[in-house]
Image (tube, rainbow, N blue to C red):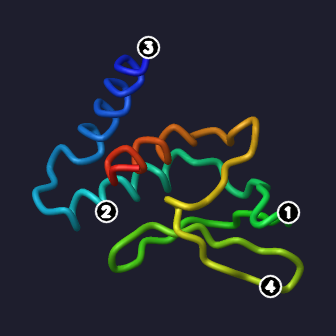
Amino acid sequence: MASKANAALEAMIEEATVDAYSDDEQLTGLFTMIEEHLAVPFTTTVLGVEATVRKIELTADTIVAVCARDRHRQKIDLLDLPLPTPAPVGAAWIDAYRHWAGR
């Protein structure tokens, strides 16, 4: 079953990175798919505290979730962001990104 899941993730990665040659271009392709398909905002729990993921941003070397709680904002690497259950629509793209990054 794991190989079927991996094949699906690899197909998503291929779709996102079809015209990308460098790691930077691949990262941008994955970011674009996440940005297009992930339903934000959504609520998750970070370090035991409920926070709202407001948007996703591309930095120089990773993709981050901009999380908010009251007036506070924090960027959390998407590789480290705990996802809620049920996961938001489009979260499979986060799984594909994590697979691509080797996590």
Query: Nearer the N terminus, badge 2 or badge 4?
Result: 2
Q: Residue 86, how many percent across, how many down?
A: 75, 35
The relative height of residue 63 versus residue 3 in the rendered view (above or below) is below
Closest to the camera, between mark 3 and mark 4, is 3
Query: Nearer the N terminus, badge 1 or badge 4?
Result: 1
Give the SS element for disc 2: helix
Disc 3: which residue: 1
Disc number placed over residue 50 in the picture, else none: 1
Disc 2: which residue: 28
How many discs appear?
A: 4
Give the SS element for disc 4: strand
Quarter location, residue 12: top left
Q: Distance between the residues labelled 1 and 4?
A: 12 Å
Disc 4: which residue: 72
Quarter location, residue 69: bottom right
| Type of amino acid under label 4 | His
Give the SS element for disc 1: strand
Query: Nearer the N terminus, badge 3 or badge 1?
Result: 3
Residue in the image at 64% along x and 38% along y: 89
Query: Nearer the N terminus, badge 2 or badge 3?
Result: 3
| Type of amino acid under label 1 | Glu
Question: Does 36 sit left or right of 41 as displayed?
Answer: left
Closest to the camera, between mark 2 and mark 1, is 1
Q: Residue 52, how many percent across, how many down?
A: 78, 64
Furthest-left residue in view?
Answer: 21
Query: Nearer the N terminus, badge 2 or badge 1?
Result: 2
The relative height of residue 71 versus residue 82 in the rendered view (above or below) is below
Label 4, residues with CA under 10 Å away: few <14, some 14-19, many ≥20: few
Closest to the camera, between mark 3 and mark 1, is 3
